[in-house]
Image (cartoon, helix red, strand yellow):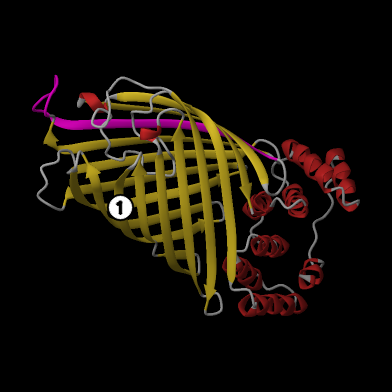
Amino acid sequence: MKLFVSLLMAFTFAFATSAQYKTALEYFQKKEYKKAYDSFELALEEDYSDPKISFYIGRSAYELGLYEQAMIAYQRVLILDEMHIRSYLELARTYIALKQPALAKAELETAKRLKPPKTVIKNINMLIAYIEGGKQKSFWNFFISLGAGYDSNINAQAGSDYIEANLGLAAGSLSGVDPISAKLAQEVAVANNVYQINGNKFFLESTFLVYGQQYLDNSEYDLLYLSLTTAPGTVLNDYKITLPLNYSRIYFGDISLLDAKSAQLKVEKVLMKTLVARVAAKYETKDYTKIANEGRDSDIAELELGVDYLFGKNLFKLAYKYANEDRSNSSATLFIDRSINNFNLGYSRPLTDSLFFNAQYNYIMYGYDDAVPTGPNSGDDREDDYQAISASLTQSFTKVFSTTLEYKYVDNNSNYVVMDYDKSTYLVKLNASF
């Protein structure tokens, strides 16, 4: 990393004139990075269009280990001045800290195309050689979360963001339809590995997820979800191409409920520094191993379109998925053949350097080929309108530990009586990421 020190000394901003900026700069020069970060944030409120302020927010955030905040700040600089070489170099440095050498290399290549002085090009080439020839090929990240909370209607669907919104469980098929509320415990463990192949031109990303949900005095509603995904991929120019392959299993109470296998092709394209578009196609097979003592299988074909847009500190995520699920056997079980239109809108932003807000709205329209068997809509084709809204606040205490407060409301309107329900969940979670 010493190469960066000499490399980055070649480019500097002119000094701004605001008193707030000067105060912040004094803190930065004294290496009081927390005070500098807070002061530069105040200066940003005075003049959002000054790239110098965002640049030093990035520098301060990097020194504090807030690499994602540093990344956002440098990207904001490049919106204002896409020719600023030092910001590309600092962004590359940040990507290295985030264990994203392929993205770091892309920023260094961009800096080279801007034709900096020969001495700087030489150092850039040395850094690229360092990235390509680095001895470390395997990068691990781990996430653990322990939560406790309250569920207002446990005999409705699970309501977990880690699992597909509608598992196909009828609320009345395993229990009565009357709402049952209960206290719950939640555990999440994620292990992620990225392995670089052939000089970082290709990579293999693998993720193992364990999600557990237990209800006090209602163990028959406990849920366990296991998922293993491996995704070979590559980065070509501004395209990221991956092929995720997944196997998952769900246990409901003491029942082995569902086995699923899927293959997906995903392409992401950086349209500009703050806008990423993606398109994905997925094929999945599901084996509902035990539902009312009868097995059933289904095949799902899915197409996804999505964009992520960063506006200042605000990150917007918009996605649309269309899927068609068909029976793959002659089982008489109802309500598998269906079309699915899934709309998802996400929003997140940092409120301070350690407090983050996240909100999400999900709307899914399910159209079934089979008719409702009983009730006031008997004989009509079944239709479900699923809506879920969630919000959370996450407070970081250190680089490793944080806590989250989360609320989620689900409303499933259905002309099939046993699947017409609503529910609320409240959770407090302690998280560790390393």
Magenta region, main secondary structure:
strand
* Drawn side of residue 346 relative to residue 139, left or right: left
Q: Does the magenta stretch include residue 81?
A: no
Please say if 95 is above or below 386.
below
In-front residue for pair 403/281: 403
Q: Which amino acid does label 1 sit on?
A: Asp
* Drawn side of residue 172 relative to residue 398, left or right: left
Q: How crowded is mark 1: few (under 14 residues within 10 Å), some or many (20 or more)?
A: some
Residue 420 location (% of width, % of height): 27, 25
Residue 64 location (% of width, % of height): 76, 51
* Drawn side of residue 349 relative to residue 422, left or right: right
In-front residue for pair 79/160: 160
Reading the image, the residue beneath label 1 is: 259
- What count of labels does the image hold? 1
Where is residue 116, by image quadrant? bottom right
Please say if 203 is above or below 278.
below
Where is residue 35, by image quadrant? top right
Residue 130 location (% of width, % of height): 67, 77
Mark 1, secondary structure of its residue? strand
In-front residue for pair 344/113: 344
Please say if 150 is above or below 338.
above
What stretch of residues is rendered in magenta?
373-396
On-image quarter of the N terminus = bottom right
On-image quarter of the C terminus = bottom right
**What residue is shown at x 44% (from left), y 41% (from top)?**
161
Residue 61 location (% of width, % of height): 74, 50
